[in-house]
Image: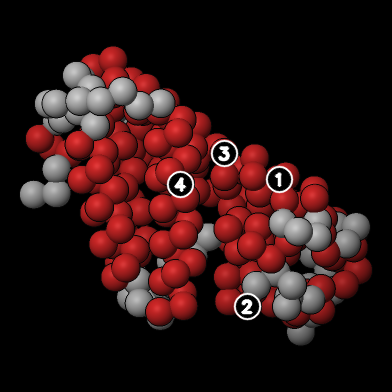
């Protein structure tokens, strides 16, 4: 039964989480406001009290997903004194955990929205790009610190490598969807580990696959 909520913060959260669930299952374009309200068990009046239109909740979903992901990855950075390569590989271990869950598809809501709307919704495209950039900034920070702590085997720009790893991650999820097999993601993440270690003469042995 659809109902109104007396808690505006909870109502907004329910609407966003319902939208995330639908986007992950069927994409943003196929998701309707009626479906969002039904999934959240809320009225359309509640929806329009918080969001002007579907694009508005789409922007909220992008922000929510980015913050959720950053919070999950933050576990890898909890020890600020840890070797930056250890922190980076802890991030990859978290990513491997996403791909290893047999009961959940490894997909990114921001990546899905960007693929659908980059050509038709400039604001959504720019917001997706900015939030994808948050992941890249964190990896850039770790790679920069790793260059200072370890001897680089070759010169590289941390931000360029970070964008490469971001593209590998997003692209792997996209291709895995077409194959209905998430083992591809795990394989590519292991290749990413090998590549990162190849950038340094003496990478931390804890950062290897073994």
Q: Nearer the viewer, mark 3 or mark 2?
A: 3
Q: Is mark 1 in CB contact (under 8 Å) with mark 2?
A: no
Q: Nearer the viewer, mark 4 or mark 1?
A: 4
Q: Is mark 4 in CB contact (under 8 Å) with mark 3?
A: no
Q: Which residue is mark 2?
A: 26
Relative depth, front residue between 191 and 111 = 191
Q: Is mark 1 in CB contact (under 8 Å) with mark 3?
A: no
C-alpha gap between disc 4 and disc 1: 16 Å
Mark 3 residue element:
helix
Quadrant in the rendering for residue 183 = bottom left
How many numbered discs?
4
Question: Is residue 14 shown to the viewer in this render?
Answer: no
C-alpha gap between disc 1 and disc 2: 21 Å
At 43% from the left and 43% from the top, the residue drawn is 164
Mark toward the start of the polypeptide (4 vs 3): 3
Colouring chosen for the image of the structure: secondary structure
24 up-or-down from 165: above or below: below
75 up-or-down from 96: above or below: above
Mark toward the start of the polypeptide (4 vs 1): 1
C-alpha gap between disc 3 and disc 2: 25 Å
C-alpha gap between disc 4 and disc 3: 9 Å
Quadrant in the rendering for residue 52 = bottom right
At 25% from the left and 25% from the top, the residue drawn is 154
Mark toward the start of the polypeptide (4 vs 2): 2
Circle 4 packing at 10 Å, graded few (<14), some (14-19), many (20+), is: some
Q: Which residue is mark 3?
A: 133
Residue 79 screen position, x and y as percent = 30, 27
Q: Which residue is mark 4?
A: 166
Relative depth, front residue between 68 and 23 = 23
């Amino acid at each position: 039964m659809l109902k109104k909520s007396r808690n505006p913060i909870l109502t907004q959260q329910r609407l966003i989480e319902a939208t995330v669930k639908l986007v992950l299952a069927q994409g943003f374009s196929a998701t309707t406001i009626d479906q969002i309200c039904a999934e959240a068990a809320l009225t359309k009046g509640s929806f329009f009290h918080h969001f002007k239109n579907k694009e508005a909740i789409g922007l909220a979903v992008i922000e929510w997903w980015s913050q959720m992901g950053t919070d999950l990855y933050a576990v890898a950075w909890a020890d600020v004194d840890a070797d930056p390569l250890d922190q980076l590989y802890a991030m990859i271990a978290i990513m491997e955990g996403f791909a290893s869950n047999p009961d959940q598809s490894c997909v990114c809501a921001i990546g899905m929205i960007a693929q659908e709307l980059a050509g038709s919704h400039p604001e959504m495209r720019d917001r997706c790009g900015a939030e994808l950039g948050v992941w890249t900034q964190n990896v850039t920070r770790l790679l920069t610190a790793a260059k200072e702590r370890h001897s680089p085997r070759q010169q590289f720009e941390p931000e360029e490598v970070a964008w490469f790893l971001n593209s590998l991650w997003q692209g792997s999820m996209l291709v895995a969807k077409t194959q209905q097999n998430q083992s591809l993601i795990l394989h590519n993440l292991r290749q990413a580990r090998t590549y990162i270690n190849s950038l340094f003469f003496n990478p931390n042995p804890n950062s290897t696959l073994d």
